[in-house]
Amino acid sequence: MWTKESLHEFIREKMGDYLFIVVSNREPYVHLYKKGKIEYIRGAGGVVTALDPVMQACRGLWVVNGSGEADRKVTDGQGKIAVPPDNPSYTLKRIWLTKEEENGYYYGYSNEAIWPLCHMAFQRPVFRSEDWEYYQQVNKKFAKAIMDEVGDKKAFIWIQDYHFCLLPKYLKEMAPNQLIIAHFWHIPWPGYEAFSICPQRKEILDGLLANDLLGFHIRCHCDNFFSAVDREIESKIDRERFSVVRGGHETIIRPYPISVDFQGISSVVESQKVAQAMDALKEEFQLSGCRLLLGIDRIDYTKGIPERMAGIDRLLEKHPEYKEKIVFLQVGEISRLHIPRYKALNDEINALVEQINWKHSTGMWKPIIMIRRHMSFSELLALNRLCDVAVVSSLHDGMNLVAKEFVSSRVDNQGVLVLSEFTGASRELTDAILINPFDRDQVAEGLFTALELSAEDAQKRMVKMRNIVELNNIFRWAGKAISELLKFEFKE
Ligand code: GDG
């Protein structure tokens, strides 16, 4: 079984003197001012959750967009800082973006064009040529910063996600023989008809085909990518090797289902810190006496939060006997609020909570509690431990690590997972109660089934899911992708 230690040993043995550089937009540690003092928080989001334990094992350099208000204060002249701040094991290099760059590259092209383009959430993408300009500019800026680090050495570069479609191409243009590049696409890749509306589709494919290795979570996303290449780019698709050859360069395409640090989570969950957090949260939200249903998400329209609330509403309509017996707690970190669609979603969620609570409340009891404040990782794990049912109702999701974190937290083998069939995770976690979030009756039915499940059945399901996540942990994900990367040879 892959572990943090075996991954570390593997990298140390195989990578020799080559540099190992990971690139992502979001950073794992964000420095902020709190009451005049500098503090740090863990960034919310799947990419950093997955990559931080990998980097702690690999000890490389992680290049990110520096986004915290106190980030510059704690870094050296090259934007570098050793992290995790309490027990450093790798280096973070922060790239500084101007407001215009952040707006065009991050909010604009990445999150108003590519994000809705790739998710079947029926949100229309917005393609603005000026956002595309900034997207190119920022990809170039990252390429330059990476090459400043690489110099004349050889390096393995591992790019994360949809913010950097053009980065592999820019890097290969700058240093054709020094770099071996892999790219992991954390979100779904859409079917061809959906993808074909993108005005920059050829440039995006052209950028991604500069990678030596391109990973998706599941086979279906790889197949969709092949269809796009087939229809748009003159190339040879080799179904046998599962690769694309274009202009003499081959890009290997592979599915790697991402995961979490199962062992790490299982041990933190049993710590004193989590036990204290469980007590404090029970007290703060008066959780004793009710069965707890839980949702943890970045507030995003792909996560199906209104659909989940509609399901709670329907459950209480159909089964009023559950009034005063259950409470649904939603943790929601605000994200991308500068984008109007996210602001509207936030308002929609607030209105729904108000309306459903008003409709069903009795005396002191209300069915929904919404938590807006930032929660530490121990608090999130404490909630995972406290709840009876975890609800993941994404309309479309590459993988969904919240589901895997929940399973990893349940060292007691209890708790039931209600999971959308449109998540990558539903392919592995088949012992969850699977739902179609677009169907409010089905969501309510799924919640009801979860609440009614016998303890014995729930335990059987949880044990099976824990075995799957334990074996297919994040170190296996990284180990498999890096093993593939190591098969490539640097050109002379
Ligand atoms: C992308 C893909 C894919 C969530 N809310 C809060 C919070 N979180 C943490 C969770 C979890 C992470 O953020 C979310 O991970 P997901 O995987 O569920 O989702 P995305 O951020 O959309 O990630 C996704 C992933 O990349 C990895 O490849 O699985 O499909 O969309 O760790 O615990 N953390 C805090 N407060 C919150 O309110 N502190």
Image (cartoon, rainbow, N blue to C red):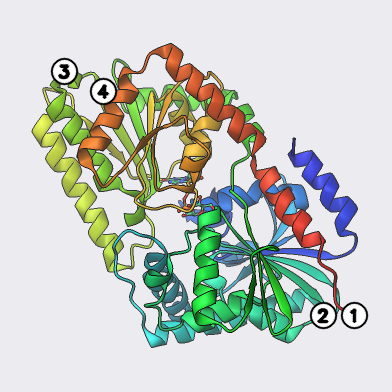
User: Which image quadrant for residue 210?
Assistant: bottom right
Query: Residue 177, which numbered label?
Result: 2
Quarter the N terminus occupies: top right
Query: Residue 296, which numbered label?
Result: none
Nearer-N-terminus badge (2/4)? 2
At label 1, the amino acid type is: Glu
Q: Is residue 45 above or below residue 134?
A: above
Could you say whether the residue bearing mark 2 is in a helix, strand or loop? loop
At label 4, the amino acid type is: Ile
Nearer-N-terminus badge (1/2)? 2
Q: Viewed as shown, does residue 306 lie left or right of 35? A: left
Q: CA distance from mark 1 to mark 2?
A: 7 Å
Q: Which residue is mark 4?
A: 326
Q: Viewed as shown, does residue 103 lie left or right of 235? A: left
Quarter the C terminus occupies: bottom right
Image location (x, y in percent) of residue 464: 55, 25
Answer few, some or many: residues within 10 Å of disc 3's Cα (few below 14, many 20 plus, some between 14 and 19). few
Instruction: Please report contact status of discs 1 and 3: CB closer than 8 Å, yes or no.
Output: no
Instruction: Identify which residue is drawn at 55% across, 22% down.
Output: 463
Nearer-N-terminus badge (3/2)? 2
Q: Which residue is mark 1?
A: 492
Instruction: Identify which residue is drawn at 51% across, 31% down.
Output: 407
Nearer-N-terminus badge (3/4)? 3
Image location (x, y in percent) of residue 436: 31, 43
Asked whether mark 4 and ligand 1 are closer than 8 Å, the reply comes as no
Answer few, some or many: residues within 10 Å of disc 2's Cα (few below 14, many 20 plus, some between 14 and 19). some
Q: Which residue is mark 3?
A: 321
Residue 300: in sight, yes or no? no
Given residues 397 and 358, the one toward you in this image is: 397
At label 3, the amino acid type is: Glu
